[in-house]
Image: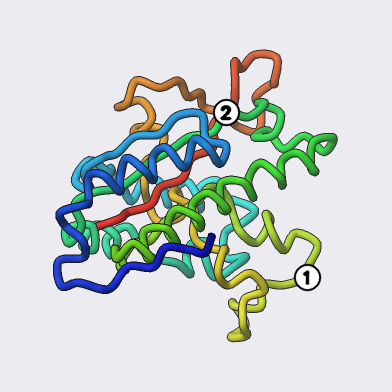
Amino acid sequence: MGKRIERIKVDMNEGRLEEDLERYRQKTLELGANSAAVLGADEIPVDERVTLKCRIPRCFGYGACVHCPPNTLKPLELRELLRKYRKAVFFTKDVPPEIIIRDRATIKERVEAYQNIFKIVSEIESMAFYDGHYLAFGFASGSCRHTYCGQQKNCLALEGEKCRFSLISRPSMEAVGIDVYRMVAMLDWDIYPIGSGAKAEDIPKGTLAGIVIVQ
């Protein structure tokens, strides 16, 4: 069976929005998410202090690709854009804490886990687009540079060339200033701060997250 493609309407299928949002929420779970919720766009916390953490202390991904600060969408720009949207689908995926800590022994598992978030976001965004919500867009987790091009010497898009993964690469939620910790806590889901000095045995679980702003 082929992909369902809806005729574009002026109202972007407004009347079916709630039904579609629930379908997207369920789809994230089918694709590997552990928790998912439909949120209002005005419930998405955007804070410049999140991207400050990319610089102090300096993240290894800072400036490394077109989708990481300072090269990507700024928090102020995102905040203004969200004023034009009303609904989003937010999801999280539980992962072993050593994946977040970046233990060398878990490189393969780490890449697979982050790629799963990118793939879920891409799939949901595509579903929304073909359902007539053609202005939908999403953010994933972590740097696409290290998730997809970790073995490459450069980010082609940063050099003005075509991205190697143009349809699936995108900024992370944190790269554009979304306070993921706060979003998860607001939903009363579990999330723990994991830094470079953390030990996996001290942390119940790791959490990765993604979001698609639908309409």
**Is residue 103 placed above or below 56 in the rendered structure?**
above
**Is residue 110 placed above or below 203 in the rendered structure?**
below
Q: Is residue 146 left or right of residue 52?
A: right
Q: Nearer the viewer, mark 1 or mark 2?
A: 2
Q: Which mark is residue 94?
A: 2
* 3D distance between C-alphas at marks 1 and 2: 30 Å
Residue named by callout 1: 153
Q: Position of residue 3 (x, y in %)?
A: 48, 63
**Is residue 53 placed above or below 175 in the rendered structure?**
above
> Tag 2, which secondary structure?
strand
Categorize mark 1 by other alpha carbons within 10 Å: few (<14), some (14-19), many (20+): few
Q: Position of residue 154 (x, y in %)?
A: 72, 72
Q: Write the residue at 62% across / 65% down.
A: 64
Residue 58 appears in the picture as rendered: no
Q: Position of residue 51 (x, y in %)?
A: 42, 51
Name which residue type carries label 1. Answer: Lys
Residue 104 appears in the picture as rendered: yes
Q: Write the residue at 20% across / 57% down.
A: 85
Q: Write the residue at 52% across / 35% down.
A: 33
Return the disc, 1 or 2, that comes first in the chain's sequence: 2
Name which residue type carries label 2. Answer: Asp
Display colour scheme: rainbow
Q: Nearer the viewer, residue 120 or 71?
A: 120
Q: Which mark is residue 198?
A: none
